[in-house]
Image (cartoon, helix red, strand yellow):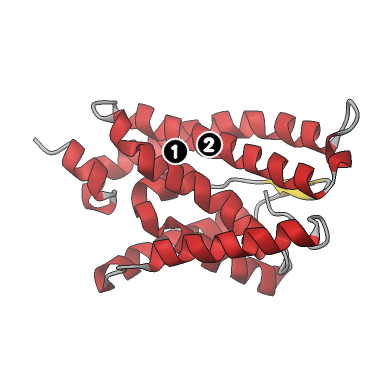
Amino acid sequence: MHIADGVLSLTVALATTAGAVGVLAYSIKGVKEEDIPKISLLTGAFFVSSLINIPIGPTSVHPLLGGFLGLVLGRRAPLGIFIGLLLQAVLFQHGGITTLGANTLLMSLPALLIYWLSPLGRGMPMFAKGFSAGFLAIGSGVLLLVVFLLLSDARYGEGAFSVIRMVMMAYLPLALLEGVLTGFAVKHLYAMRPTLLTEVIQKEHEP
């Protein structure tokens, strides 16, 4: 879901950059020293997984881990996502510098959405919570991508084989796959190290 340089209009690029700054300010506020190892670990996982990509028009299809990051890092997820995206853009030209703000929002807002909605899943089995998080993160990210593309150029949505149609079709099976993988990952992580999950989930499943 990385947007390359030159894809977005100048107005959208500037607006998303400003939005990303606000999201990062929210994410970094109140970070504690004990949060840093967990953020670093998940940043590395996001960095590696997002390098596996299949280009589709102005974007690409790849694992996002948005749901997993939202459940494990909570409000700190955007911080790890931004660092991973910045390193990918600088080291591998994966994504873009001018679209760094847009890409940060594309992946950070779904992760935050999962974090904010986590209390609504109270009582759900851990696998179901993880599956829902992984699927919803992909779905909401794709919707944001569609909005950014249409605001930049309406031609992205024109025709039966438009870029937007191709992106949506490509991400549907990935959403299902990421839902399953996130479900197993969250279930296994909670069984092995429940302290790594967000406080919302820890309190929810305390005896």
Question: Residue 51: which quarter of the image?
Answer: bottom right
Disc 2 residue type (three-letter):
Glu
Do residues under tags 1 and 2 come within 8 Å of each other at their CB atoms? yes
Above or below residue 156? Residue 127 is: above
Query: Closer to the camera, 28 or 12?
Result: 12
Residue depicted at 25% across the width and 30% down the height? 122
Q: Residue at x 47, y 59 (%)?
A: 78
Q: Position of residue 43 (x, y in %)?
A: 47, 62
Q: Which mark is residue 182?
A: 1
List x then y, in percent, for residue 107. 56, 51
Q: Which mark is residue 60?
A: none
Element under label 1? helix
Residue type pointed to by label 1: Thr
Q: Nearer the viewer, residue 170 or 29?
A: 29
Q: Is residue 130 visible?
A: yes
- Mark 2, Cα crowd under 10 Å, few <14 / some 14-19 / many 20+, is many
Report the side of 13 relative to 42 (left or right): right
Q: Is residue 114 above or below residue 88?
A: above
